[in-house]
Structure formats: structure tokens, C-alpha cells
């Protein structure tokens, strides 16, 4: 996936200094309880829809935009279910905090973005495709949210020093 222009422009100002990016991911549920997944064009992994916020964009609106752009599905955001540190958890090579939203599909039709997704589809908990990225991080929470269970937002609790787990 190409690096967004605004990130390249920001890099031209800050060089190689540490730069945390705000990202969003969307756990999108269909009325029948199935989960929306996309097969990433860059690495072939199936994953929940994810992306980077554009300058000044609200995180929940970024999640709505990313889902529509990548899959053709229109969504409404239900709630925030997790805030994940991508570097610490090992699912990204760039410093990225991902806000994961539980979303409900409200319209549109499956249509993959030709540059970002090799495929898109709806999957039940017993029919998840492989290889599936990051399921151990978001899977249980995603299906708990889909079932309507009360969940506190998952986040990194403060620790001293902060770089130790």
C-alpha cells in the first residue's frame, strides 16, 4: 500500500524522528451476525478494514470512510471497543495507534477497492478465512460486540517504565 501524501509531506518536515500515526479499524457486522473482512492486496492476509486518519479527520468518520472506500459497504459506528499500540503488539512496523470501532452495516454493496483489497466478504465465526491477520488481538472482542455483550474499551494500562510489558 502506498504511503499517503500527507505522511510523506510530514516526513519531509520531521525527517526520521519517531512519528506516531493515528489509525482506525472497523469490526463491521451484518444483520445476520457475519463479520466483514477484506483480503489485503499488499500481503494477501484477511483482516478487518483498517486505515490511517487524514489530517483533521475524526476517528469515527475515518472508520466509516475506510469501510466504504475499501469494501463498498456503508456503516454506522456503534462504539469504540479497543485502542491498540501497533508497535508494542507487533502488528505494524510503523508507530501506530489503532482505534477499533464496532460498526453496523446500513447499506451499500460489496465491491472491493482494486488497489487495496484482493477480495472482500462476510464471514460467520465458524467460517473465518485464512490467513487471518491479528485475530488474537481483536477476534474475541469483535464477536462479543457483535453479540451485544457489554465491553469496556480495551487499552494499554499505564506501566512504569512505559516500554516494559
Image (cartoon, grey):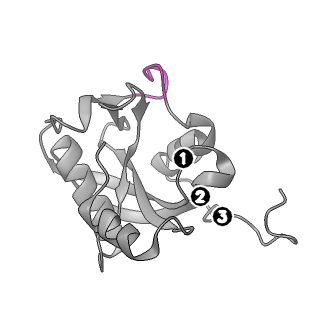
How far apart marks 1 and 3 lie (CA) works out to: 17 Å
Q: Main secondary structure of the magenta part?
A: loop
**Is 158 left, or right, of 20 in this rendering?**
right
x and y, in percent, of residue 103 in the image:
35, 55
Dot 1 corresponds to which residue? 92
Q: Quadrant of residue 82?
A: bottom right
- Quarter of the figure that contains the N terminus: top left
* SS state under label 3: loop
User: CB atoms at circles 3 and 2 under 8 Å apart?
Assistant: no
In the displayed orientation, state which residue is furthest to the right. Answer: 160
x and y, in percent, of residue 90 in the image:
64, 44
Classify mark 1: residues with Cα within 10 Å, few (<14), some (14-19) or many (20+).
Answer: few
Please give the name of the residue rendered at 37% of the width and 24% of the height, measured from the top-left corner.
44
Q: Is residue 142 above or below residue 16?
A: above
Dot 3 corresponds to which residue? 155
Q: Quadrant of residue 30?
A: top left
Mark linked to residue 30: none
How far apart marks 2 and 1 lie (CA) works out to: 11 Å
Dot 2 corresponds to which residue? 84
**Is 142 left, or right, of 68 in this rendering?**
right
Q: Is residue 55 above or below residue 8?
A: below
Please give the name of the residue rendered at 41% of the width and 59% of the height, measured from the top-left corner.
24
Which one is in front, 36 or 96?
A: 96
x and y, in percent, of residue 26 in the image:
39, 52
Q: Earlier in the sequence, mark 2 or mark 1?
A: 2
Q: Quadrant of residue 38?
A: top left
Classify mark 2: residues with Cα within 10 Å, few (<14), some (14-19) or many (20+).
Answer: many
- Look at the image and give the residue range highlighted in magenta: 124-132
User: CB atoms at circles 1 and 3 under 8 Å apart?
Assistant: no
Is 126 covered by the magenta stretch?
A: yes
Amino acid at each position: 500500500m502506498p504511503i499517503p501524501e500527507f505522511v510523506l509531506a510530514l516526513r519531509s518536515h520531521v525527517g526520521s524522528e519517531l512519528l506516531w500515526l493515528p489509525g482506525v479499524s472497523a469490526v463491521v457486522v451484518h444483520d445476520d451476525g457475519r463479520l466483514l473482512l477484506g483480503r489485503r492486496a499488499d500481503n494477501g492476509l484477511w483482516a478487518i478494514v483498517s486505515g490511517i486518519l487524514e489530517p483533521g479527520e475524526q476517528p469515527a468518520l475515518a472508520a466509516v470512510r475506510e469501510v466504504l472506500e475499501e469494501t463498498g459497504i456503508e456503516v454506522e459506528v456503534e462504539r469504540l471497543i479497543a485502542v491498540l499500540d501497533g508497535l508494542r503488539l507487533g502488528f505494524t512496523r510503523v508507530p501506530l495507534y489503532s482505534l477499533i470501532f464496532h460498526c453496523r452495516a446500513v447499506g451499500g454493496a460489496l465491491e472491493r477497492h482494486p488497489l487495496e483489497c484482493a477480495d472482500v466478504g462476510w464471514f460467520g465465526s465458524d467460517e473465518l478465512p485464512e490467513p487471518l491477520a491479528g485475530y488474537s488481538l481483536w477476534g474475541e472482542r469483535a464477536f462479543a460486540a457483535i453479540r451485544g455483550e457489554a465491553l469496556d474499551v480495551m487499552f494499554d494500562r499505564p506501566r512504569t517504565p512505559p516500554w516494559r510489558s
